[in-house]
């Protein structure tokens, strides 16, 4: 038997299964006895939990809201809420330039400079190219190479090559391919490493030769050459599995171990750590910045980060960004753009007059009607915290009821900000708010309704 | 009053009759039939809710159930029928639950929906049941785990889902699932031992 019980054996004993061999080991191993006791405690704790669910009324509410959304047409995958009273700046209006579709020139030349490394994106979470240098290419199997641009999808089995390429999933994973063939991984991904290096932060799995390196929240780097694999762990812990023998070895950071191909895991050579930086996982980009209308060779910087000269394509986070354009032979233009998810933003050399279009505020008459509706139904809300006020006669303060209201006036979501009242009263407020009947506002709105708590005379 | 059934494990395969009805509703929903979508909700909403229990916080359960079916409506055209609809729905449910963990819009009170109490009069083998305060503390500990560790722990140790199914639902492999489960269990044990209200679960004689 190994030095200690495996996880499976621990669970077996903790679950009450009797085994003479395991019992004999436990009789001599304090660490395993401690581990079994912990496992038993955890199992007792979890077994005692009571599952929670929704009431029939809640199910009916969900059904009603679903049907309303389905019949109205589902919103964009990345909805932008409009806050009552706080105007939201939409995308900047720019030149009325009709851009020709991004032309993809057929590419025949195979990769010469950059190592081809197979990327295995998750089949359910679509891989999307969020940044692609002009030489980015993709191919499947023995098909011809074709150009890869931002917003293209990459699926399982793809081979990719570029001097710079970033792939992303909707869950926020990132693969960044640099010029030397190395990948930087920030998030969840599996990479089959032909040659080069992978630097990972977060959940990642790298298959390099016969070594499979798996981590949960670790920061590490794997390098693969013709005859060696090196694993360098900055922080956290990784598990290295030998595919041939199924041996496992845990490496805890900081540490660095190198193996020659064909050697056992225990034969790895410990050496001094290398000098490398962990990749930074950015927020999930959702908006494509289309630079196709810019003159070729225009230098572009976004948020003080230089992206080089056009043409190239990439995607950015939603929200406001500072863009600096320097067309060849012309002075630099600087402006701010507001990107909204799901919608490409066309960037062109701006005409003199640019204006930011504010989202339309709700119609004043409609708002006044909704105010009247709320005022009329306030007694229902007040009933939720009257009992609490009677029990706490000296209490005062304000609670904000936040409502997300559909275009038709149905309350889709309700939440409570502030904590001067009891949890029971807050729950009542939320439930009552969802049943409020409001007049149509014409578009989905988020409303904040302040409720001033007082025991004064009405 | 609605009672929870006693089935704690996840049923990925639905009974034959229900599946047959579901298949027909699936085809119509793919064609854009709104009433078929309502049928799918009626058929599967309780199962989805069971699968989300402990995967998402109690206060978010209603919203995430809604989000799951919105995603079903958005994505149903991509369902090719290579697996059972319930299998596909399970993957959607897990995917939406994982995404919901990353959404933090406003700070708000931890509103507890009034849920029917599950009353089990049968004596438990260990004669231990959690008070509402302890239940809340354990749920808070689960919240402290990273979303991926929490998902694996809940699905495997609480819902009884096998590692292969978890790997498929999370689009990873069994080794990763076991690794996450290993770390999640150790972390939960350490957190619970540090909580005076829960430490008694770990007291007792030698193994």
Image (tube, coloured by chain):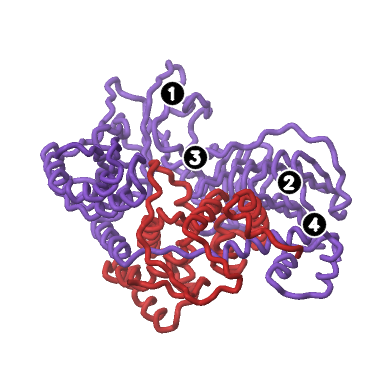
Tell me the number on the disc at residue A31.
4
- Image coordinates of residue B111 in percent, x first then y, are 37, 51
Q: Are marks 1 and 4 in contact (CB under 8 Å)?
A: no
Chain A palette colour: purple
The secondary element bearing badge 4 is classed as helix
The secondary element bearing badge 3 is classed as loop
Tell me the number on the disc at residue A195.
2
Q: Mark 2: few, some, or many residues within 10 Å (few <14, many ≥20)? A: many
Q: Are marks 2 and 4 in contact (CB under 8 Å)?
A: no
Tell me the number on the disc at residue A325.
1
Chain B palette colour: red
Q: Earlier in the sequence, mark 2 or mark 3?
A: 2
- Residue at image coords 78%, 57%: A248
Q: Are marks 3 and 4 in contact (CB under 8 Å)?
A: no
Q: Determine if residue A300 is in view.
A: no
| Chain letter of disc 2 in the image | A
The relative height of residue A342 versus residue A328 in the rendered view (above or below) is: below
Disc 3 or disc 4, which is closer to the eye?
4
User: Toward the viewer: A209 or A221?
Assistant: A221
Q: Mark 4: few, some, or many residues within 10 Å (few <14, many ≥20)? A: few
Q: Are marks 2 and 1 in contact (CB under 8 Å)?
A: no
Q: CA distance from mark 1 to mark 4?
A: 63 Å
Q: Is circle 3 on the same chain as circle 4?
A: yes
């Amino acid at each position: 038997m190994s030095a200690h019980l495996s996880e499976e054996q621990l669970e077996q004993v903790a679950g009450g299964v009797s085994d003479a061999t395991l019992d004999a080991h436990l009789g001599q191993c304090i660490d395993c006895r401690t581990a079994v006791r912990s496992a038993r405690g955890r199992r007792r704790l979890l077994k005692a939990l009571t599952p929670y669910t929704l009431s029939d009324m809640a199910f009916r509410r969900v059904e009603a809201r679903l049907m309303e959304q389905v019949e109205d047409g589902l919103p964009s995958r990345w909805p932008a809420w409009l806050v009552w009273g706080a105007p939201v700046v939409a995308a900047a209006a720019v030149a009325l330039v009709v851009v020709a579709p991004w032309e993809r020139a057929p590419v025949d030349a195979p990769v010469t400079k950059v190592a081809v490394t197979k990327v295995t994106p998750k089949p359910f979470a679509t891989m999307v190219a969020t940044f692609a240098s002009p030489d980015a290419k993709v191919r499947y199997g023995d098909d011809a190479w074709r150009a890869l641009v931002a917003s293209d999808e990459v699926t399982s089995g793809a081979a990719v090559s570029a001097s710079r390429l970033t792939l992303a999933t909707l869950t926020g994973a990132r693969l960044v391919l640099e010029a030397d063939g190395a990948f930087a991984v920030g998030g969840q991904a599996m990479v089959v490493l032909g040659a080069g290096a992978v630097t990972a932060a977060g959940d990642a799995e790298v298959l390099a030769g016969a070594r499979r390196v798996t981590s949960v929240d670790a920061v590490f780097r794997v390098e693969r050459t013709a005859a060696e694999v090196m694993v360098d762990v900055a922080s956290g812990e990784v598990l290295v599995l030998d595919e041939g023998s199924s041996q496992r070895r845990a490496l805890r950071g900081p540490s660095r171990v190198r193996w020659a191909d064909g050697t056992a895991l225990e034969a790895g050579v410990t050496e001094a750590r290398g000098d490398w930086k962990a990749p930074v996982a950015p927020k999930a980009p959702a908006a494509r910045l289309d630079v196709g209308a810019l003159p070729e060779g225009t230098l572009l910087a976004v948020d003080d980060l230089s992206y080089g000269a056009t043409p190239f394509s990439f995607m950015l986070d939603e929200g406001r960004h500072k863009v600096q354009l320097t067309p060849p032979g012309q002075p630099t233009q600087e402006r701010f753009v507001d990107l909204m998810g799901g919608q490409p933003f066309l960037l062109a050399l701006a005409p003199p007059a640019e204006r930011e279009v504010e989202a339309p505020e709700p119609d004043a008459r409609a708002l006044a009607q909704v105010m009247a509706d709320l005022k009329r139904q306030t007694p229902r809300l007040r009933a939720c915290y009257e009992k609490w006020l009677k029990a706490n006669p000296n209490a005062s303060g304000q609670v904000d009821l936040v409502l997300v209201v559909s275009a038709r006036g149905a309350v889709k979501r309700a939440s409570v900000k502030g904590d001067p009242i009891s949890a029971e009263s807050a729950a009542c407020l939320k439930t009552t708010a969802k049943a409020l009947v409001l007049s149509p506002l014409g578009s989905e709105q988020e409303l904040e309704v302040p409720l001033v708590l007082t025991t004064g005379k009405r | 009053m609605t009672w929870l059934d006693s089935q704690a494990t996840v049923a990925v395969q639905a009974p034959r009759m229900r599946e047959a009805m579901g298949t027909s509703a699936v085809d119509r929903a793919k064609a854009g039939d709104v009433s078929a979508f309502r049928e799918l909700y009626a058929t599967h909403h309780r199962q989805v809710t069971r699968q989300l229990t402990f995967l998402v916080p109690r206060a978010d359960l209603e919203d995430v159930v809604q989000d799951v079916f919105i995603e079903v409506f958005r994505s149903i055209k991509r369902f090719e029928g290579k697996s059972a609809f319930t299998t596909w729905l399970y993957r959607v449910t897990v995917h939406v639950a994982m995404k919901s963990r990353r959404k933090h819009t406003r700070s708000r009170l931890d509103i507890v929906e009034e849920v029917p109490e599950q009353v089990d009069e049968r004596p438990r083998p260990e004669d231990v049941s959690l008070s509402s305060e302890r239940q809340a503390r354990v749920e808070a500990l689960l919240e402290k785990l990273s979303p991926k560790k929490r998902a694996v722990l809940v699905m495997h140790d609480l819902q009884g889902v096998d590692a292969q199914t978890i790997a498929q639902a999370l689009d990873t492999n069994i080794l990763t699932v076991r690794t996450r489960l290993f770390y999640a269990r150790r972390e939960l044990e350490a957190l619970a031992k540090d909580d005076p209200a829960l430490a008694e679960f770990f007291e007792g004689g030698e193994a």
